[in-house]
Image: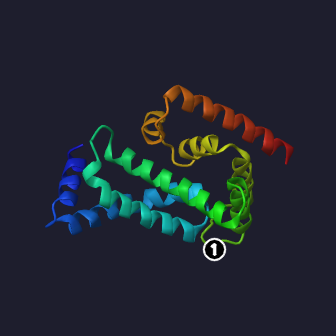
């Protein structure tokens, strides 16, 4: 917790904010990249959303109240930025969010940054069929190994609801994978 306070102080002080921003990026760039990539699927889009996330964190750090961990607050921003990005992409294309996900999945097979196997690709396709909330919960728990308590802070949802969503998502994915 002291590290969070130190980082926030660096970011809030105009003399040290550049150093603070470098530390922020150094600490969170890699985990946030994978978190965002799990949601938007495309490498270039992930980089754009990641950049927007860091800008939003930097410009809004004075609004951070410390009611949650800094990590949770930053992940909430990254999650919201990712979902907003997908909604805007769908709106621009005149298609649904689900169709955007399906298009990105098709591109994933030829994406040089995707290092997954055929099985992982099937899993991604199964996940894409789930409702948005179940997708998020499944990805955060399965890929990022996030604890329910952390997810609760990031998604502002009760632990019980998250456990239920994860359980339902797992069952649906199992069914989808059995039929394919």
Q: Position of residue 176 (x, y in %)?
A: 79, 43
Q: Nearer the viewer, residue 146 or 7?
A: 7
Relative horizontal placement of residue 67, taking residue 111 as reference (left or right)? left
Q: Position of residue 179 (x, y in %)?
A: 86, 43
Relative horizontal placement of residue 180, taking residue 123 as reference (left or right)? right
Question: Which residue is at a point 57% across and 41% down the rendered structure image?
Answer: 137
Residue projecting furthest to the left = 15
Residue projecting furthest to the top = 160
Relative horizontal placement of residue 154, taking residue 1 as reference (left or right)? right
Question: Which residue is at a point 69% across and 66% down the rendered structure image?
Answer: 93
Question: Which residue is at a point 48% across and 61% down the rendered structure image?
Answer: 33
Element under label 1? loop
Q: Position of residue 96 (x, y in %)?
A: 71, 55
Tell me which colouring the rendered structure shows. rainbow
> Where's the N terminus, which quadrant?
top left
Residue 73, compared with residue 34, is above or below; it is above
Residue beneath label 1, please?
Answer: 112
Question: Which residue is at a point 61% across and 66% down the rendered structure image?
Answer: 42
Residue 14, compared with residue 172, is above or below; it is below
Relative horizontal placement of residue 122, taking residue 6 as reference (left or right)? right
Q: Position of residue 148 (x, y in %)?
A: 48, 34
Query: Alpha-carbon neighbours of circle 1 within 10 Å: few (<14), some, or many (≥20)?
Result: few
């Amino acid at each position: 917790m002291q590290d969070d306070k130190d980082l926030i102080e660096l970011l809030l002080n105009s003399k040290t904010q550049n150093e603070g921003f470098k530390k922020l990026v150094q600490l969170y760039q890699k985990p946030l990249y994978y978190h965002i990539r799990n949601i938007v699927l495309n490498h270039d889009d992930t980089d754009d959303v990641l950049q927007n996330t860091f800008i939003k964190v930097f410009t809004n750090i004075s609004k951070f109240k410390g009611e949650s961990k800094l990590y949770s607050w930053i992940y909430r921003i990254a999650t919201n930025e990712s979902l907003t990005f997908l909604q805007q992409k769908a709106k621009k294309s005149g298609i649904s969010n689900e169709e955007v996900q399906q298009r990105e999945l098709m591109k994933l097979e030829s994406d040089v940054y995707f290092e997954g196997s055929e099985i992982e690709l099937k899993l991604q396709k199964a996940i894409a069929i789930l409702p948005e909330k179940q997708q998020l919960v499944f990805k955060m728990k399965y890929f990022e190994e996030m604890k329910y308590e952390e997810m609760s802070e990031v998604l502002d949802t009760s632990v019980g609801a998250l456990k239920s969503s994860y359980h339902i998502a797992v069952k649906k994915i199992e069914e989808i994978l059995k039929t394919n």
